[in-house]
Image (spheres, grey):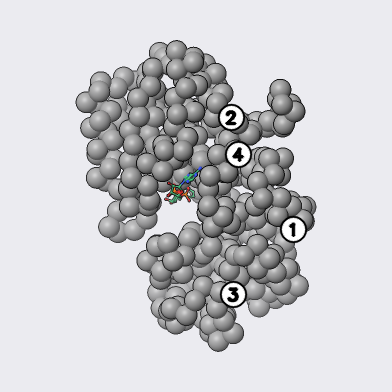
């Protein structure tokens, strides 16, 4: 759906089609100021609890509250510290205690205003408090707008690893205001952009073609380019999720680049040293080179992927992320932790070309080992 707003800019809507739980993702510049009007029809009583982090609340909470106030929607806010460490049992408990202490009712709605950390944490709180209440996502990072706010995965990290405790809980509405990305640092934009490029690489070669020209406009904040990038990404993820909500099959394609990427992220201790999107960019470039090595994909496609990431300032070679890298055995061990192996063979997302990713269930560990040796030697 495409509507032109009063100021002439484009507003898009992507429907996430799930039986009985379908919901729209509205995408536009300046949407936060209209949040009250968009949320009001979703409420059984005019009352919401906003969950946000300190950084985002300092920048954007007032706009949201003014819009809710303007529509007579009572609201209060739970503000948590920014950062991945907040996605934990302790903060989940504190949020649930706060909600229950203030007498939350089944008919109330939680509004998650923030990046993927807030969406996952507040979404999980909404999934479990009173056995589940409705929630609205207002994603404020590029990564959250194109990835984490779509698909209903919510959860927290534990001492045993990331995202290991959680629930599928779909929001009732997603509002992606691309103007909010204006306060996000360039490095965060770039990291989120890796997930945008991923959708082109999975199954939309013409989108990747477009990105090779449009990435500068996306990074520079051009509203039309950002809206198109977010819309295409949400549409792609929504289609996969509608097909395979609980990740039994096709949804695995969304993990393109993530097996390699997670190994480097884990090696960096999931820290600011290497952001998730940076690791995924490197991982995708490696998945294409590995595919080429196995004779599945033209080498030129792998080179094109790497050239694009380098142009954007994203890593595409192991040497791009510094020197403190595990050896082949170390990387294999980190990957094995992440993956289910069956009889020495691994499941990987590989590609026959740009826009032709597929799930390969029979990758031989020996081939992987030889590939990693070459990657580490060549850096
Ligand atoms: N549920 C899913 O399907 C899914 C998918 C991908 C990632 N994730 C999760 O998402 C999380 C990462 O999300 P993220 O990258 O958005 O991280 P984040 O939520 O930590 O946000 C990154 C940083 O940017 C700040 N920030 C957010 N919006 C801002 C804005 N508009 N202006 C200025 N600063 C802003 C935040 O305060 C934070 O410091 C991870 O926990 C990951 O596991 C979930
Ligand atoms: Zn990712």
Cα distance between the residues tagged 3 and 4: 30 Å
Query: What's the residue at 38%, 41% (across, down)?
Result: 53
Cα distance between the residues tagged 1 and 2: 27 Å
Cα distance between the residues tagged 2 and 4: 8 Å
Q: Earlier in the sequence, mark 3 or mark 1?
A: 1
Image coords of residue 55 (percent x, y):
41, 43
Q: Secondary structure at mark 2?
A: helix
| Above or below, 285 relative to 224 | below
Q: Are marks 1 and 4 in contact (CB under 8 Å)?
A: no
Give the residue number, with chain letter if any, for mark 2: 31
Give the residue number, with chain letter if any, for mark 3: 317
Q: Secondary structure at mark 3?
A: loop
Looking at the picture, tell me which residue is in the foreground, 218 or 347: 218
Give the residue number, with chain letter if any, for mark 1: 212
Task: Answer yes or no: is residue 47 visible.
Answer: yes
Q: Secondary structure at mark 4?
A: helix
Image coords of residue 227 (percent x, y):
67, 40
Query: What's the residue at 70%, 59% (across, down)?
Result: 356
What is the quadrant of the C terminus in the image?
bottom right
| Number of residues whose C-alpha sits closer than 10 Å to that of mark 3, classed few (under 14), some (14–19) or many (20 or more) | many
Give the residue number, with chain letter if any, for mark 4: 178
- Disc 3: residue Cβ within 8 A of ligand 2's nearest atom: no
Cα distance between the residues tagged 3 and 2: 38 Å
In the rendering, which numbered label is found on residue 17? none
């Amino acid at each position: 759906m495409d509507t032109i707003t009063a100021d002439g800019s484009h507003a898009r809507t992507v429907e996430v089609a799930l039986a009985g739980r379908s919901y729209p993702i509205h995408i536009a510049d300046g949407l936060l100021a209209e949040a009250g009007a968009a949320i009001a029809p979703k409420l059984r009583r005019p009352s919401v609890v906003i969950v946000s982090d300190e950084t985002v609340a300092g920048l954007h909470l007032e706009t949201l509250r003014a819009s809710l106030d303007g529509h007579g929607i009572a609201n209060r806010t739970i503000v948590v510290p920014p950062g991945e460490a907040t996605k934990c049992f302790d903060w989940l408990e504190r949020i649930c205690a706060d909600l229950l202490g203030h007498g939350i009712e089944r008919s109330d709605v939680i509004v998650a205003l923030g990046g993927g950390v807030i969406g996952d944490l507040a979404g999980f709180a909404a999934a479990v408090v009173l056995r589940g209440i409705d929630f609205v996502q207002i994603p404020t990072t590029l990564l959250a707008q194109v990835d984490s706010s779509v698909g209903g995965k919510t959860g927290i990290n534990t001492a045993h690893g990331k995202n290991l405790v959680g629930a599928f809980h779909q929001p009732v509405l997603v509002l992606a205001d691309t103007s909010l990305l204006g306060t996000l640092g360039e490095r965060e934009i770039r990291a989120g952009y890796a997930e945008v490029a991923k959708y082109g690489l999975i199954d939309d070669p013409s989108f990747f073609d477009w990105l090779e020209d449009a990435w500068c406009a996306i990074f520079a904040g051009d509203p039309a380019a950002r809206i198109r990038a977010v819309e295409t990404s949400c549409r792609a993820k929504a289609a996969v999720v509608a097909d395979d909500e609980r990740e039994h099959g096709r949804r695995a394609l969304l993990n393109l680049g993530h097996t390699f990427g997670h190994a480097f992220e884990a090696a960096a201790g999931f820290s600011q040293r290497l952001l998730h999107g940076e690791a995924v960019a490197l991982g995708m470039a490696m998945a294409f080179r590995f595919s080429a090595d196995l004779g599945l994909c033209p080498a030129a496609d792998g080179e094109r992927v790497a050239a694009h990431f380098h142009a954007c300032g994203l890593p595409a070679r192991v040497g791009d992320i510094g020197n403190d890298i595990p050896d082949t055995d170390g990387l294999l061990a980190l990957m094995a932790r992440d993956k289910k192996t069956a009889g020495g063979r691994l499941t990987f997302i590989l590609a026959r070309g740009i826009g032709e990713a597929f799930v390969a269930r029979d990758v031989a560990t020996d081939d992987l080992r030889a590939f990693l040796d070459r990657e580490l030697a060549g850096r």
